[in-house]
Amino acid sequence: MAARKQKIISAAVLIISLSALLSYFVKPKPPLLELVLPEQELSSYEAHYPGDTTLADRVVKSYRLAMVLVQSPYTQRNVISLENIRSWARERFQSQPDFLHPAILSVPRESHDTVFGAIGYNLFTGLKYWLEDSAGELLRFQIARFHNTGAYESFASAYFDFFGEDSDAASLLARYQSDRARLAVDVVLFAFSWLCASVLALCAVVVSRGKKRVERVRRVVGAGWLLLGLSYFSAAWTNNEVASLVSALVSGGIGAYLLYPFVIASHEEAGPRLLRICLSSQWIALATWFSFSLISIQILTWIRSGLPSAPDPITLLLSSLSGNFIHDPISGKRALTIGVAVSWIAVSLWTVRQQKRDIMAQEEAAEELAALPSAYALEQR
């Protein structure tokens, strides 16, 4: 016990010392994440001076303009995307007419107003910025690849016919894609971490055999809830969200219980205390079904409730995979919806099968116990 306390104290001293050194010598700089350049949209692009509002006047009054589109396989998607860009640009220009050519680039402020927030800022912000920059490079590559597709060429032709083929229109299209891709950076990082965790969990379950597999499923589900709680806690720390903090506590509690199941036992002399128990396979299966159902509900809710002005994480993730932040990934959402439904049915059938198997095992055990007195009596004779 003394050695464990010594290790905890040494770790705390090391963390505080490292944070102090980083706060004195290192100043983390956030990546700019300018993921799309206007030159990618228009080869003859020329930069304008800050304060130019020519395009702002044209977009705000664009309700007088009519769309003339060339018929193509992407016509319907182009119409929706053009309207989304026009609505987005009108809102931005009305609130900030020079947002395309600002004199000073705004940098988001990190929350470090408490002593613990300051420690976390110095320890993890540099790593966070590096991960965001790496994710930005991946998104930049995917977007550049999308610019060589027929879908983009069809949209670009319709876009410049509608907004005008000039440098401001190219800057507007680049800014629209950059802003949406910037929202996808955190989604890509979380998705990658969950993908790695899911692959490791699947491998751990597959290599186990017999009764050990059910126990491994319990540990995997519990670890998944702890990882979910950590994700919620990270969101609460970064965005100061009370709802995320409550979700982190609930998820962490569920994960801790699945990893270390217990009951509260009371005794007249000793009083109430916690006792470790072993969960049966039917309860483990039910907990797995419960967890997978909640994940499925969350994914389907994201898909059903996403808006063009506030894209959901699923939309951002699918757009990141294709590099297409212009069109709504309808086909990808449909395929994911079907995949979630089929997976949920499979997990439900496995849960029902596990329940029946356990009931049969309990009945057989009861019959064997009931037969024990008869066998004992025959031996005595």
Image (spheres, grey):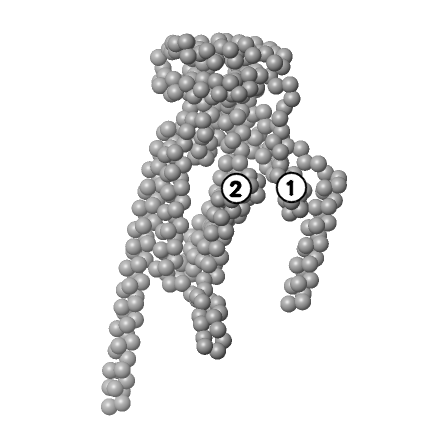
At horizontal 68% and vertical 55% (from top left) the residue drawn is: 11
Q: Quadrant of the C terminus?
A: bottom left
Query: Residue 253, which numbered label?
Result: none
Callout 2: helix, strand or loop? loop
* Disc 2 to disc 1: CB gap under 8 Å: no
Q: Dot 1: what SS?
A: loop
Quarter of the image where the N terminus is located: bottom right
Q: Earlier in the sequence, mark 2 or mark 1?
A: 1
Q: Is residue 287 left or right of residue 237?
A: left
| Type of amino acid at the residue the image marks with label 1 | Asp
**What percent of the width, then of the height, locates residue 168?**
54, 12
Q: Which mark is residue 113?
A: 1
Residue lying furthest bottom in this view? 381
Q: Position of residue 337 (x, y in %)?
A: 35, 37
- Marks 2 and 1 sit apart, C-alpha to C-alpha, by 15 Å
User: Can you identify the residue that label 2 sits on?
Assistant: 241
Q: Considering depth in this image, is 180 or 214 the residue closer to the camera? A: 180
